[in-house]
């Protein structure tokens, strides 16, 4: 055993524990708008109305993402109550499962050392950790994909039928999370591997056809739900038209419609978008990833074709995302286990070589750069506990830039974890709590007593998903003045609205008390004037929570 392997084995447990610990604080922060709060609200509707088939969001039948993540959140609500922690917990548990599947996949295609490094990298990769705080579909999807791939690998090598069943189950869960395009991420590498090795018989191997049939069986709950909600009700207006088939949307419009920009949900893609997105999303390991890809292309002497199961899947997914017309940064998270394995393989190969010395220097520069950015943000934003945050940041900068180890592998990992600790302590204990103060809906919802959960609550002229989620009961969206007038007749009631509309209602004679005037800013669209403490007030809007007497 190499000395580097011994050092890695000795330090793996505490680094992994630290990485997991850095992900935990985000579970206790408020849910962030828009997507996370919308999804949490959809799951809330399931529990409040005891309806596990029909998805409702934005005040109407909701057709976009499949049911699986909402079912998971709703199950959690049933156990822990409807709250932000309960919404995030099942996704976090899936993510933990994904760490294990990343380990066994890397172990079986490479070795234990690559597996350990892969897990350590994936655990603190920036957008993976952010996905555990701002929960959407990615923690579920990523784990289901890598789990399906590993079970297929075991089934391929030893023919165990139960691994075929498990692979089909996880593939079906992935489809019920995001749609059928996930089959490209799961199967793309396998197709390339079989073609490279001329294993033509694998395309007609009965086990893979059984897996395909089982996938169809396992997604029946999703298809049934879509059929009941939409196909049985052609009169429903969805995307501004009637006769919308939920099953067609699942198999075509939600995936190929977005890719070709022919579906109801459109975007405008940039072929280089995920290239530069990955460079910041995979921090603090971006330099290692670039070097790892270059190594595979030009220098890798071990051309084991089975590894194309992950290389190919990462490549196919990245190309599909880049060619797609609908692109969002968090999409790339689903191939992070693959990227971690690719990076880990390179790091492991160079563990005893001088090449790693240069990456260690880059990591030191990264620590210093991130520290400077954080200190600048602390200065310009004027957020609370600035001295505490600055002190912690400087201590981590000092540790990450000064502490050295004899083994470059440990230095590389330690500096990366110092950078990760710096980022996540700052984000979860200082920066995000500061930003979340400007989610006016959350502030307003907190003013409604739990005892008033049955009192009508409405939103007019200003809407917030966090207001809908954190309110004790249902929230009625009031799209026009006529619906507002009808709602006001139900008094007493609570109304969330803009300051201008609230003042207008009071001047018109509506008897109402202003319970709160929370400040609002769209915190997912940060601009310099908002970050600047001296100019922030110019960017803020005011929302009212009215109690209609």
Image (spheres, rainbow, N blue to C red):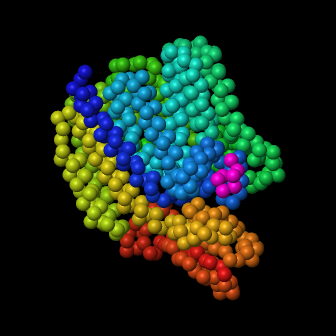
Q: Is residue 362 magenta?
A: no
Q: In this view, does 319 lie above or below 509?
A: above
* Residue under the point 38% across and 56% down: 427
Residue at 59% in and 65% down? 471
- In x, y percent, where is residue 32? 51, 58
Answer above or below: position of 212 versus 423. Answer: above
Q: Up-down: is 474 above or below 271? A: below
- Which residue is depicted at the point 60% across and 28% down? 168
Range shown magenta? 46-52
Relative to residue 104, is residue 396 drawn left or right?
Answer: left
- Near-viewer residue (431 or 363): 431
Q: Is residue 370 visible?
A: yes
Tell me where residue 29 appears, x and y as whole percent.
45, 58
Q: In the displayed structure, does residue 413 sit left or right of residue 482?
A: left
Q: Can I make out residue 181 in this image?
A: no
* Quarter of the figure that contains the C terminus: bottom right
Identify the image quadrant of the N terminus: top left
Residue drawn 44% across and 64% down? 435
Of 239 and 136, nearer the camera is 136
User: Who is closer to the viewer here, 417 or 351?
Assistant: 417
Residue 227 image position (x, y, % from top left): 76, 42
Count of labels shown?
0
Q: Position of residue 119 (x, y in %)?
A: 38, 35
């Amino acid at each position: 055993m190499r000395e580097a392997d011994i050092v890695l084995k000795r330090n793996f447990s505490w680094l992994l524990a630290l990485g997991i610990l850095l992900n935990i604080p985000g579970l206790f922060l408020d849910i962030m708008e828009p997507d996370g709060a919308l999804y949490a609200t959809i799951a809330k509707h399931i529990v409040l109305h005891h309806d596990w088939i029909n998805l409702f969001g934005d005040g109407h039948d909701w057709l976009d993402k499949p049911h699986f993540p909402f079912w998971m959140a709703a199950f959690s609500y049933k156990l822990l109550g409807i709250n932000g922690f309960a919404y995030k917990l099942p996704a976090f548990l899936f993510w933990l499962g994904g760490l294990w599947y990343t380990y066994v996949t890397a172990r079986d295609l490479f070795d234990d050392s690559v597996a350990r490094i892969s897990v350590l990298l994936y655990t603190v990769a920036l957008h993976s950790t952010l996905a555990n705080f701002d929960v959407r579909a990615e923690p579920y999807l990523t784990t289901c994909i890598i789990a399906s791939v590993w079970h297929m690998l075991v089934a391929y090598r030893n023919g165990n039928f139960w691994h075929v069943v498990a692979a089909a189950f996880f593939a079906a869960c992935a489809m019920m999370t995001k749609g059928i395009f996930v089959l490209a991420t799961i199967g793309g590498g396998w197709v390339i591997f079989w073609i490279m090795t001329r294993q033509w018989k694998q395309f007609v191997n009965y086990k893979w056809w059984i897996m395909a049939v089982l996938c169809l069986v396992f997604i029946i709950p999703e298809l049934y739900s879509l059929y009941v909600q939409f196909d049985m009700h052609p009169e429903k207006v969805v995307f501004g038209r009637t006769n919308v088939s939920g099953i067609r949307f699942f198999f075509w419009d939600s995936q190929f419609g977005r890719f070709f920009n022919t579906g109801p949900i459109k975007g405008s893609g940039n072929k280089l978008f995920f290239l530069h997105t990955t460079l910041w999303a995979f921090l603090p390991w971006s330099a290692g990833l670039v070097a790892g890809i270059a190594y595979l292309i030009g220098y890798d002497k071990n051309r084991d074709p089975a590894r194309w199961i992950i290389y190919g899947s990462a490549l196919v997914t990245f190309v599909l995302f880049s060619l797609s017309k609908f692109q969002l940064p968090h999409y790339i998270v689903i191939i992070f286990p693959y990227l971690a394995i690719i990076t880990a393989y390179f790091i492991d190969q160079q563990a005893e070589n001088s090449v790693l010395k240069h990456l260690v220097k880059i990591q030191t520069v990264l620590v210093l750069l991130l520290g400077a950015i954080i200190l600048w943000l602390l200065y310009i934003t004027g957020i609370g506990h600035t001295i505490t945050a600055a002190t912690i940041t400087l201590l981590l900068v000092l540790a990450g830039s000064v502490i050295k180890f004899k083994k470059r592998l440990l230095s590389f990992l330690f500096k990366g974890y110092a950078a990760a600790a710096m980022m996540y302590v700052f984000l979860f204990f200082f920066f995000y709590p500061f930003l979340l103060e400007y989610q006016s809906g959350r502030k307003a919802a907190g003013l409604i007593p739990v005892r008033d959960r049955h009192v009508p609550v409405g939103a007019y002229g200003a809407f917030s998903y966090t207001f809908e989620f954190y309110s004790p009961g249902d929230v009625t969206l009031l799209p026009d003045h006529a619906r507002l007038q009808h709602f006001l007749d139900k008094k007493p009631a609570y109304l969330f609205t803009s300051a201008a509309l609230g003042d207008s209602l009071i001047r018109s004679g509506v008897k109402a008390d202003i319970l709160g005037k929370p400040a609002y800013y769209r915190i997912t669209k940060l601009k310099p004037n908002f970050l600047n403490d001296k100019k922030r007030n110019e960017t803020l809007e005011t929302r009212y929570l009215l109690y209609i007497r």
